[in-house]
Image (cartoon, rainbow, N blue to C red):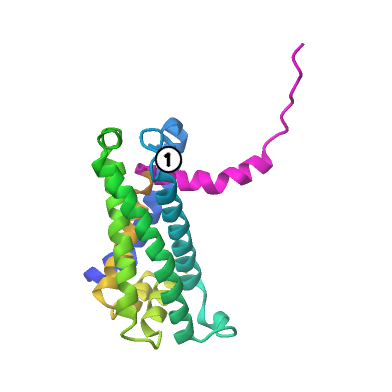
Amino acid sequence: MNSNTILFGLYPYMAVIVCLVGCWIRYDREQYSWKAGSSQVLRGKGMRIASNAFHVGILFVLAGHFVGLLTPEVLYHHVISTPNKQLLAMVSGGLFGALCFVGMTMLIYRRFTDERVQASSSFSDNLVLILLYIQLILELSTIFASSQHMDGSVMVMLADWAQSIVLLRPMEAAASITSVGLVYKLHVFLGMTLLLIFPFTRLVHIISGVAAPVKYLLRNYQIVRQSR
């Protein structure tokens, strides 16, 4: 078994298992730690712009990755060709990636230059922010790498990898990603690593952000009585 099979065939499943089990245990045993841990009260200047730019950018980038990687060719070919799909991904991903980059740069500067914010930050807070920043830089770097091959071939190989992982075909997944460039492999590996450490960081608040509206709709009615 070679390193490519371990890193891109087996490691994704290990990351997913650790993420799911870790989130379950943390929510069950440490619910008070399940929060974003906002530091806006310590320094609000520029926080709204930085936070909104970061969140809007990263949500679009994540949605684009999800749709782009998991939509089979046979489906999107009814609407758009592979080269045009790659061009669309490069332009939209570049715009929202740049927006996210600006917001994250502001957040990192704030995190590491403000003494009060830094004092309230944990090791995992700083680690996640740095890893996300590196991941974003890699994502933007793939745009320049993709401009060297506009036929969409690499995009197809990456999509084959993601779809093989979902279909529980690790050997096919590892084979699909063998020929892609180093920047893509680093991007994929770091993405899996972020998933691995997800339950042990403030990133868990993403689940609450998604589940809260659903939980609100399904909750029991509240009975409110007027005090006399």
Q: Circle 1 is placed at which residue position?
A: 36
Q: Can residue 168 be seen in this view?
A: no
The residue that appears at 39% across and 88% down in the rendered structure is 151
- Specify the quadrant of the image occupied by residue 94: bottom left
Above or below, 91 against 222 in this view is: below
Instruction: Check if residue 52 falls in the magenta segment.
Output: no
On the image, the x and y values in percent for residue 73 come to 51, 82
Q: Who is closer to the viewer here, 53 or 217? A: 53
Q: What residue type is labelled 1?
A: Ala
Q: Which residue lies furthest to the front in this view?
A: 45
Q: Which of 185 and 86 is in front in this view?
A: 86
Considering depth in this image, is 52 or 157 the residue closer to the camera?
Answer: 52
Res 112 quadrant in image: top left
Q: In which quarter of the image is the C terminus?
A: top right
For image coordinates 28% across by 54% down, the residue present is 131
Q: Tell me the crowding category of disc 1: few under 14, some 14 to 19, or many 20 or more residues within 10 angstroms, Cα based.
A: some
Quadrant containing the N terminus is bottom left
What is the magenta range? 200-228
Where residue 106 sits: x, y (%)? Answer: 33, 51
